[in-house]
Image (cartoon, grey):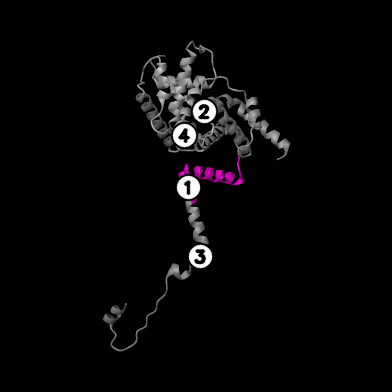
Amino acid sequence: MNDRPELERDLAALRKVSAKELPDLETTIRMARQRVPDLGPWHWKIRREIMALLHSIRTRPAVAAAVLAALVILVASVVPVSYQRVTGHDVALTLTGKGIGTQELRAVA
Amino acid sequence: MDSRDDAARWDRLITLLKPIHAQAMATARRLCRSVDDGDDLYQESVLRAYDKLNGLRDESRFRSWFFATLLSRHRSRVRRPRRDSVPIEGAFDRRTEPVGEDGSSWEEERIRAQRAARALSGLPPVQREAIVLHDVEGFSVEEVAEMQGVTLSAVKSRLTRGREKLRRFYLRHGLRNDTAPNPESLTAGAMAWPGKERSHERST
């Protein structure tokens, strides 16, 4: 027993010490129900929910990617972007006159 | 909430909790700096589990579901500024009998537990959880991954990093494969993590 590493022995001692004098379940439930709910004001509750959501997203990369994609789609479908800004403008150029050949057209374009 | 629903929900929670009560409560103590802190964490987790119980569909997964709730409450408490932090020196002072069940000195057990608690308290919460659940409680890596809500490789990484930090902690205090601990070298003051202990709390 004594040749075990100190860490292992300390963890075993922690296991043993922390398992002693455990209150039974009924006592624990009774004490828990008597506690004043530590909820705080309503905005703290909302903040907690948001933090929990962020945490669960952060720990699941696939969910995070899906949420990001959904957000992008949502933003793209909500934010108004004009047709002209997306497709550009049609520009028609008409040149009239004598002596306009390929060279001149290229220079104007 | 109707009081009959309320009572039924408590009954359901008690039925589900009964088989895992001792292990879950002991785990809560091991995650915290003291017995009182651990009991407090466990009560908070029970209340939280009660709040969320209607969302539990598969009761066969209750154990990992409850432990996940426990870990979530643990991290919330770590983030929360503490007003009533219990010093580790008094963390396991409740018991006073001189000799342990296997004949070992209770004082030695207490000092060792105190030292382990101090070493664990210097780890980031997620690494501490992984070490406690896997190395102390004996849960498999898969079970820890489910409880922590991360991948297997993330748990393995947390275990490796956590063990390495614990190893360094013990080496720093000249403890490797020695036999009985020297009580003078194990006093809480002599076993402090360098720098700010709380600075570890947020990182992963």
Nearer to us: label 4 or label 3: 4
Q: Overall secondary structure of the magenta stretch?
A: helix
Residue drawn where x is 59% and y is 33% of the image: B44
Check if residue A62 falls in the magenta segment.
Answer: yes
Task: Kindly identify which chain the residue marked by label 2 belongs to.
Answer: B
Magenta extent: A39-67
Label 4 with label 2: CB-CB less than 8 Å: no
Q: Secondary structure at mark 2?
A: loop
Residue B1: image location, x then y, percent:
70, 40
Which mark lies nearer to you, 3 or 2?
Answer: 2
Using a 10 Å C-alpha cutoff, classify the residue at mark 3 as few (fewer than 14 neighbours), some (14 to 19) or many (20 or more).
few
Mark 1 or mark 2, which is nearer to you?
Answer: 2
| Residue B86, placed above or below residue B105 | below
Amino acid of disc 1: Ala
Nearer the camera: disc 4 or disc 2: 2
Quadrant holding the C terminus of chain B: top left
| Residue B64 position within the rendered picture, expressed as x and y whole percent measured from the top left | 54, 32
Who comes first in sequence, dot 4 or dot 2? 2
The tag earlier along the polypeptide, 1 or 3, is 1
Classed neighbour count for the residue bearing mark 4: other residues with Cα under 10 Å, few (<14), some (14–19), many (≥20): many
The residue identified by callout 1 is A64
- Disc sitting over residue B4 in the figure: none
Q: Tell me which chain the residue with mark 1 is part of.
A: A
Separation of disc 3 and disc 2 at Cα? Answer: 57 Å
Q: Residues within 10 Å of mark 1 (few under 14, many from 20)?
A: some
Return the residue nearer the eye: B198 or A5. Answer: B198
Query: How far from the left and from the top, in percent, is residue B137?
Result: 49, 25
- B19 left or right, relative to A72: right
What residue is shown with label 3? A80
Image position, residue A37 (x, y; %): 63, 37
According to the picture, the residue beneath numbered tag 4 turns out to be: B125
